[in-house]
Image: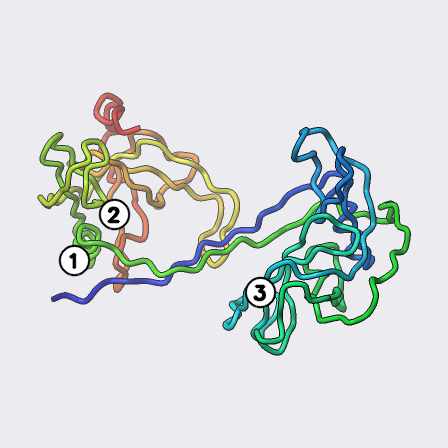
Amino acid sequence: MPDVLKAPLVVEFPFTRSLGPVQSAFLTGLREQVVLGVRTTDGRVLVPPVEYDPVTAGELDDLVEVAPTGTVTTWAWNHAPRRGQPLDTPFAWVLVRLDGADTALLHALDAPGPDTVRTGMRVRIRWAARRTGAITDIACFEPYDGEPAQVTGSTGAFEDPVTGIVAAARLDYTYTPGRAQSAHLDALTEHRTVGERCPSCRKVYVPPRGACPTCGVGTTEQVEVGPRGTVTTFCIVNIKAKNLDIEVPYVYAHIALDGADLALHARIGGIPYDQVRMGLRVEPVWTPGVRHPDHYRPTGEPDADYDTYKELL
């Protein structure tokens, strides 16, 4: 039995968003060690605050300061913290209803073990030493036996308010291809491109998925396609990707390989980016020791007629 193919993959990008007055006040308040909620039309105080009433959908702007102490409403123990989590030692994820709030805030509780955590226990905020106006300004919660803390009387008006945030979104996972894609990847090691033909509609899909996306039936008949193909659509990339050693601008295109009924995407090289066009005939350029083509380059053939690839747009 052949070895099962697998590979670690990471999807990562920075998520940037601007803040309205409510979220701006909340995050700026955290920077100043102040926790703000917002009062709804029925008198409840929501922490974290929202910009619109969840019942009436009306706009909310009545900011209310709540205490940095509160009560655990529920919890779950995290015995193996992962990269980027609030603490690097085992901790509890907790929902904490801060004193003066009617809803609970999710964060980490620094506790010596799960036997020391319980619903109803009293906790307080441990502030981060360096605060920038983000939820991470709350380093975590910690057990607390004292009385509810006093509030400062803040109305949410701060100097130099936070107006936007950048959050890193990242997904780490291990990808394991199935039978069809494993055969496709194995063929690429021999500089061949293999797809599968649907037994019903007779279309050839590259890369194959093991089933026809149109008919829904399984596919097993392998068909070698290409290696040449036609650019159907393309885009010019002007933002340099992290860990990708390609100078911008460059072109990524959908390429319909000869004999395939589905266009795959790849980088176009060997031609100025502003000369790439629909219908351009291209061929793969392989790098020794690499499973897939590094890029596609022009073949020098006349451009393909639009009618030959219009159904693949």
Disc number placed over residue 28 in the picture, else none? none
Pick the front one: 23 or 60: 60
Q: Tell me the quadrant of the picture where the C terminus can be found.
A: top left
At horizontal 57% and vertical 54% (from top left) the residue drawn is 168
How far apart, in angstroms, are the residues tagged by discs 1 and 3?
43 Å
Tags 2 and 3 in contact by the CB under 8 Å rule?
A: no
Question: SS of the residue at dot 2?
Answer: strand
Can you identify the residue that label 1 sits on? 190
At horizontal 48% and vertical 43% (from top left) the residue drawn is 249
Q: Is residue 90 left or right of residue 284?
A: right
Neighbours of disc 3 within 10 Å: few (<14), some (14-19), many (20+): few
Neighbours of disc 1 within 10 Å: few (<14), some (14-19), many (20+): few
Depth check, mark 2 against mark 1: the one in front is: 1
Pick the front one: 97 or 19: 97
Question: What x and y, as percent, mark residue 308?
Answer: 21, 25
How far apart, in angstroms, are the residues tagged by discs 2 and 1?
13 Å
Neighbours of disc 2 within 10 Å: few (<14), some (14-19), many (20+): many
How far apart, in angstroms, are the residues tagged by discs 2 and 3?
42 Å
Type of the residue with mark 3 = Gln
Depth check, mark 2 against mark 3: the one in front is: 3
Vertical side of 87 occupied by 297: above or below = above
Can you identify the residue that label 3 sits on? 85
Image quadrant assignment for residue 177: bottom left
| Label 2 or label 1, whichever comes before in sequence order | 1
Disc number placed over residue 284 in the picture, else none? 2
Type of the residue with mark 2 = Pro
At horizontal 78% and vertical 60% (from top left) the residue drawn is 68
Question: SS of the residue at dot 1?
Answer: loop
Outermost residue on the bottom side: it is 112
Question: What x and y, as percent, mark residue 167?
Answer: 61, 52
| Label 2 or label 3, whichever comes before in sequence order | 3
